[in-house]
Image (cartoon, helix red, strand yellow):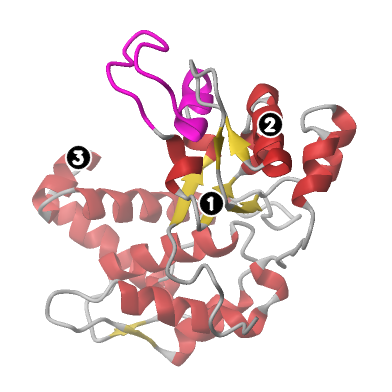
Amino acid sequence: MSTRHPPRRDAPLVAVNCAALADQMVEARLFGHERGAFTGAHAASPGLVRSADGGSLFLDEVAELPLAAQAKLLRVLQEREVLAVGATRPVAVDVRIIAAGNRDLAADVASGRFRADLYWRLAVFPLRTLPLAARPADIIAIAAHMLLARTGGDGLVPWLAPCAQGRLNAHAWPGNVRELGNVLDRALVLTDGPDIRARDLLFDTLAPAAAATPAALPGVVRDAEQIAIARAIASAPTRRDAARQLGISERTLRYKLAAGRGAMVQ
């Protein structure tokens, strides 16, 4: 089989965030349900597994699945069939399962939070991704991809100046790629030129991997204030509305923005 032309290339790829599924609806969403199977089931639903039939089902945060749903998922993998909620006969399916998570599944197995048989059934070809801080050569490339995805209607997007690239490379990234995306979103709000400068990059000082030595209180307060300002500007339609949301005057907001930019210059 050619890796360039896999047999499922034209088949559906269904992605689901298991952590976002309501506990009482996990099985119905994944495996489908019959009409009248429970209160509110006015029509039958095939479920996400059958929606991916012939293709692939991506289960993100698979460790968040309840044990009962884990047992049914194991049956899908072993028997290649799915039994919908309220159904009496299973339906054959041909689906490839791709699972991901940010927890140590082996530790969850040891503590009884994840089924050992399902773990070994899923671990056919395990891949472990390194944290962003362990892949420094990827930081700017990922940042560039994110900035291009955020291109405005005019097709223009501020780019990373060398000083900003240096600051991104020097950060520990405890929040990995999600944190990088947040930092860039803040920078796009704060920058007022064609380039993103180091002063436009605000990092959350409350991140779990903060420096071991306590930060000076004035710096912590200043950073928290600038983060609150960036969030207000991002959510408000105008800077006047942002100032009102922050409980300060528009003039004070302009002063704090200017002072924050000056403090962040490196």
Q: Nearer the viewer, mark 3 or mark 1?
A: 1
> 112 or 168, which is in the foreground?
112
Q: Nearer the viewer, mark 3 or mark 2?
A: 2
Say which amino acid is labelled 1.
Leu
Does residue 175 lie above or below 33 as drawn?
below
Identify the element where label 3 is drawn.
helix
Q: Position of residue 106 (x, y in %)?
A: 85, 44
Identify whether 136 is placed above or below 228.
Answer: below
27 left or right of 62 in image: left
Question: Going 42% across and 45% down the picture, which residue do you hit?
Answer: 51
Label 2: few (<14), some (14–19) or many (≥20) C-alpha neighbours in 10 Å: many
Mark closer to the chain start, 2 or 1: 1
Magenta-tinted stretch: 23-45
Disc on the earlier residue, 3 or 1:
1
Q: Is residue 206 visible?
A: no
> Counting other residues with Cα less than 10 Å from the Cα at mark 3, is it few (<14), some (14-19), or many (20 or more)?
some
From the image, which quarter does the N terminus lie in?
Answer: bottom right
First in sequence: mark 3 vs mark 2: 2
